[in-house]
Amino acid sequence: MIDVLPALEPSAGLVTLSRISPPAPPADLLWRCTVELARAEPDRAGGVLSARLAGAHGHSSTDAMLRGVGEAVERYALHPDGPAPAGAVRATAAGLGSRAQRFHGPDVALGAATDRELTWYPATRLRDGATVLVPSALVDYPLTGPDADGFDPSPSGAAAGEGWTAAVRSALLETVERDAFQVAWERDLRPVRVADPGTDRTLTRLLRRAAQAGLEAVLAEVPTGVPGVACAIGVVVDEAGPHPLATLGCKASDDPARRLLGALQEALQIRSAALVARERADRWPGGAVRDDDDRLRFLASPEGYARVRAWTDAFAQDGPGGPGDPAARRVSTDELVRAMVTDGADPLIVDLTHRLPLGVRESGWAAVKAVPVGYQQLRIDDTRTDTWNRARLASAEARTGLTAGPAPTGVRPHPLP
């Protein structure tokens, strides 16, 4: 395991300060690791989330620290102030010909078609090891300016780990997770409730802690196209006060207990952020959700609570899977790639390790960004129509075996900032 403490030293060049905070019920049920990035732009006026801060919550101080440093490594590597990968070019898609990855159209839906000159980064196509070029807007975050026009820049699909292989595996699992969740939410699929979360002690303790805080925790699963991997959905409902709140998290993994714990932790982490937004009186004005600040305000609103509560109430009561599933086994990264390709994906990986400070690299950290060709990306700007993978939406019931609800009317913001 990587020794994360050196990366938290300001001299390492990754962060300028860090803080580990213990649980503070009822708002924060988890340990928190917060870091200020050494590479960050000023916060937007009126923003709820800070571009300068990264971190994560965890069930223990060690878990929070490891996850928080990993998040900091990812965010640092994504920042466009870092050097472009070797082999980056400035060109039009037409000028690059077959070297350019197609990013538009209803079966890819990663951006709008354009004949403008763009910055392109080299990516490894995992099914055959070939090098293709992808627009920088599918990698860098945050990104503004001409290169971002027509795209929906997002940190989703970024991952850090102990070496390239571990980072790639994490990025691929997040890609599977985002596709499963975004499609399930938009199609109003009915995930299967996990009636018996098993005997994992960490998960059991966290469920007990949530119940003691007066929270209702609901766990469910969405099947994926990767045999042995499911996407867990964790929902935390707080109806104790005058303003009810429901937050949601997800986690795809081949380890049933790990994915349930990860989904529950993410739901609790987002709950903490939503409570901060509410305390600051950052009200959702209604209408469009264009970024994660808007999404957090929506989630903290009565409308956000009602949407998440209604979806949760519609979850199916029984079905296969869960911690007791005897078929649970470790899925190798090679198996993961093959299954994703069979499922319609053509995953690409951009290596961003070169952007990390030297000391962080020497500690063993690697950072990558997965480009989810063929899968549904997690949407940031809900007003866009060109970032829906129509084939994934249309095939959702057949692929998952889950029942879809009525077709949604209008824009339906998802609850995952």
Image (cartoon, rainbow, N blue to C red):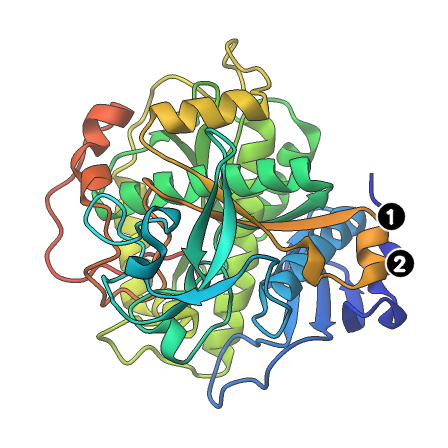
Furthest residue to the bottom?
Answer: 45
Tell me which amino acid carries mark 1: Asp
Question: Residues under labels 2 and 1: Cα distance?
Answer: 7 Å
Q: Say whether residue 247 is visible.
A: no
Q: Say whether residue 169 is visible.
A: yes
What percent of the width, then of the height, locates residue 21?
76, 64
**Image side of residue 206 versus residue 341, left or right:** right
Q: Quadrant of residue 246?
A: bottom left
User: Measured along the vertical axis of the image, is residue 372 above or below residue 114?
Assistant: above
**Image side of residue 365 versus residue 316, left or right:** right
Tell me which amino acid carries mark 2: Pro
User: Measured along the vertical axis of the image, is residue 304 above or below residue 200?
Assistant: below
Kindly identify the residue that appears in the image at 56 percent across and 71 percent down. Answer: 80
Which numbered disc covers residue 59? Answer: none
Q: Quadrant of the C terminus?
A: bottom left
Kindly identify the residue that appears in the image at 63 percent across and 33 percent down. Answer: 204
User: Measured along the vertical axis of the image, is residue 299 above or below residue 131?
Assistant: below
Kindly identify the residue that appears in the image at 19 percent across and 60 percent down. Answer: 385
Residue at the disc numbered 2:
6
Disc 2 + disc 1, Cβ < 8 Å: yes
- Look at the numbered disc 1 and give the secondary structure of its residue: loop
Kindly identify the residue that appears in the image at 32 percent across and 63 percent down. Answer: 304
Residue at the disc numbered 1:
3
What percent of the width, then of the height, locates residue 58?
68, 50
What percent of the width, then of the height, locates residue 195?
44, 25
Q: Quadrant of the N terminus?
A: top right
Counting the numbered discs, the total is 2
**Image side of residue 410 versus residue 275, left or right:** left
Pick whichever, 322 or 236, lies toward us: 322
- Look at the numbered disc 2 and give the secondary structure of its residue: helix
Q: Quadrant of residue 163?
A: top right
